[in-house]
Image (tube, grey):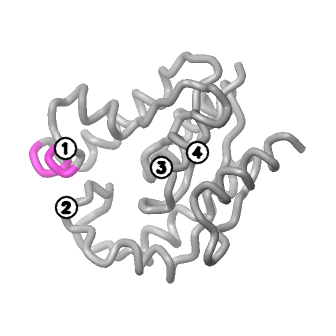
Amino acid sequence: MDNIILIGMPASGKSTLGVILARKLGYGYLDTDSFISQREKSTLQGIIDKRGLQYFLDTERSVGSEIICDRVIIATGGSMVLSDSAMEHLKSIGKVIYINVPLTELKRRLSDYSDRGIAKNDNETLEDIYNLRSPRYEKYADITVDYKQGNSLEETAEDIIKAIQQ
């Protein structure tokens, strides 16, 4: 199957880049966080607050493990990478692109993430999440696209298209 799966930290730009890439390539678009939110009729933070972190992670794993599509840009939630079964499935249906944004830039973008719906334990910092997830993003990535200071999202999308075509 010919899908493109975007992975990376929260606020790395996966959702916005996914929309741009879908338009440029003529692909469909699926944002797994939006899908989960619609299915559960709640925000991600609402799901975590009401049902618990483990319920959210189990739901995310289930969604990631069951996607069947073709010619779709799939923007995953930042925590999808915590599920080996979901990531193995996603790798089997397309190319996995890691949007690598440095921690300093993520901190700038996420100055307040208390209601963002980030899957984390109460005492975990953004740095803790970054240190836990970064090796997993690298493990599952077919291609890594590094954030470039000053690049627009359109330019980053072009970098992704070039990387895919090589």
CA distance for labels 4 and 2: 22 Å
- SS label for mark 4: strand
Which residue is identified by label 1?
Answer: 43
Disc 2 marks which residue?
A: 115
Residue type at tag 1: Thr
Q: How far apart, in angstroms, are the residues tagged by discs 2 and 1?
A: 9 Å
Q: CA distance from mark 3 to mark 4?
A: 11 Å
| Residue 121 vertical position relative to residue 128 in the rendered view, above or below | above
Q: Earlier in the sequence, mark 2 or mark 1?
A: 1
Magenta part of the chain:
45-50
- Callout 1: few (<14), some (14-19), or many (20+) C-alpha neighbours within 10 Å? some
Label pair 1/3, CB-CB below 8 angstroms = no
Q: Which amino acid type is shown beneath numbered disc 3?
A: Thr
Mark 1 vs 4, N-terminal side: 4
Residue depicted at x 76% and y 50%: 143
- Asked if labels 1 and 2 touch by Cβ distance under 8 angstroms, the answer is yes
Tell me which label, 1 or 3, sits earlier in the chain: 3
Q: Quadrant of residue 100?
A: bottom right
Tell me the distance, in whole angstroms, between the alpha carbons under discs 1 and 4: 21 Å
Q: CA distance from mark 1 to mark 3?
A: 18 Å
Give the class, few, some or many, for how many residues have Cα within 10 Å of label 2's Cα (few <14, many ≥20).
few
Question: Residue beneath label 3, please?
Answer: 16
Q: Nearer the viewer, residue 21 or 32?
A: 21
Name the N-terminal-most of marks 4 and 2.
Answer: 4
Outermost left residue: 50
Discs 3, 2 touching: Cβ within 8 Å? no
